[in-house]
């Protein structure tokens, strides 16, 4: 491991380059602590949801965060991590307050385009799980210069496209860690609630107010095929609600979302 020339906080593990911060974190999980962060300025083989590649050209902030989360709350950790990304960016760039949205279950959107992706991988031990939350945030990416076209990366956007000043990586990492630790604490409190409140009461209002899919015609892509309908919000358990053409509402724990944003561009 090559360290940054700058003094680093004890929680930060700096890798000059690595194939994937998530892969490295999982391989070294026994030596990592709750709240540790693994960061590299040059990720060469990033991984996304459903086995897809995560392209990480220069300017993408790539990092993995180690959290301890109750096993019962694992289905919603991606949504909580999405909120953490939103809050971290808003802290750093106040002009973006109220602009960022969540695309269930693991993307952060800016102007309807993908700003960040999240990949959570867990290892359970009893009632608790250690989760590696991988975040790829387009901080200052020149997509054309990196020879990445829309077919390769989808409709992505970078912070420098909307702000003349871009936060430094260390500031973003500190803010991301701060909000992820808050999220983990809330999830732990929910599981310890004697009333059995696994409904994410503390997170749901914010999740629902940022829901980019609500009211949009979407298709949920599953292993067994595709189901089309209109997104009907996020359930009390953090599941996607889909209203079918016949009026029936179905709940989904996972799935790949295809959608055509009304009045705008396609997003995947």
Image: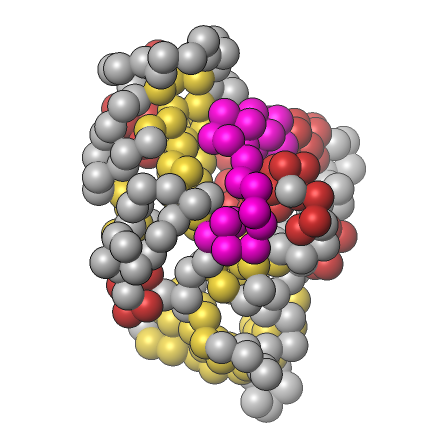
Counting the numbered discs, the total is 0
Where's residue 138, x and y in %? 44, 47
Residue 158 is left or right of residue 48, and the answer is: right
Where's residue 199, x and y in %? 69, 47
Q: Residue at x 75, y 42 (%)?
A: 202
Residue 132 is left or right of residue 104, and the answer is: left
Where's residue 64, x and y in %? 41, 31
Q: Residue at x 65, y 42 (%)?
A: 93
Quarter in which the N terminus is drawn? top left
Q: Residue at x 45, y 70 (%)?
A: 267
Regarding residue 173, the answer to whether it shows in the image is no
Q: Residue furthest front?
A: 164
**Which is more toward the observer, 243 or 31?**
31
| Looking at the image, residue 160 lies above or below residue 257 | above
Which SS does the magenta portion mostly show? helix
Q: Residue at x 58, y 49 (%)?
A: 163
**Is residue 175 on the magenta stretch?**
yes
Quarter in which the C terminus is drawn? bottom left
| Looking at the image, residue 203 lies above or below residue 217 | above
**Which is more toward the observer, 162 or 80?**
162
**Which is more toward the observer, 142 or 64?**
142
**Which is more toward the observer, 49 or 179?**
179
Task: Specify the segment rendered in magenta.
Answer: 158-181
**Is residue 19 on the magenta stretch?**
no
Residue 111 is left or right of residue 29, and the answer is: right
């Amino acid at each position: 491991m090559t360290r940054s020339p700058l003094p680093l906080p004890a929680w930060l593990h700096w890798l000059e380059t690595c194939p994937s911060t998530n892969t490295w974190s999982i391989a070294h999980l026994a030596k990592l602590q709750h709240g540790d962060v693994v960061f590299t300025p040059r990720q060469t083989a990033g991984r996304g949801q459903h086995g897809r590649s995560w392209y990480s050209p220069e300017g993408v902030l790539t990092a993995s965060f180690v959290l301890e989360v109750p096993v019962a709350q694992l289905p919603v950790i991606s949504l909580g991590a999405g909120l953490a990304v939103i809050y971290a960016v808003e802290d750093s760039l106040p002009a973006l307050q109220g602009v960022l949205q969540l695309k269930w279950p693991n993307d952060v959107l800016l102007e309807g385009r993908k700003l960040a992706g999240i990949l959570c991988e867990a290892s359970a031990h009893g009632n608790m799980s250690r989760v590696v939350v991988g975040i790829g945030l387009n901080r200052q990416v020149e997509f054309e210069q990196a020879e990445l076209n829309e077919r390769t990366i989808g409709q992505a956007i970078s912070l420098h496209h909307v702000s003349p000043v871009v936060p430094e990586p260390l500031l973003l990492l500190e803010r991301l860690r701060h909000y992820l630790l808050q999220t983990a604490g809330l999830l732990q409190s929910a599981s310890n609630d004697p009333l059995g409140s696994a409904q994410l009461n503390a997170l749901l209002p914010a999740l629902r107010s940022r829901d980019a899919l609500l009211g949009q015609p979407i298709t949920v892509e599953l292993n067994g095929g595709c189901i089309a309908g209109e997104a009907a919000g996020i359930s009390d358990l953090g599941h996607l609600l889909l209203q079918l053409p016949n009026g029936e509402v179905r709940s989904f724990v996972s799935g790949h979302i295809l959608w055509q944003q009304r009045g705008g561009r396609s997003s995947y």
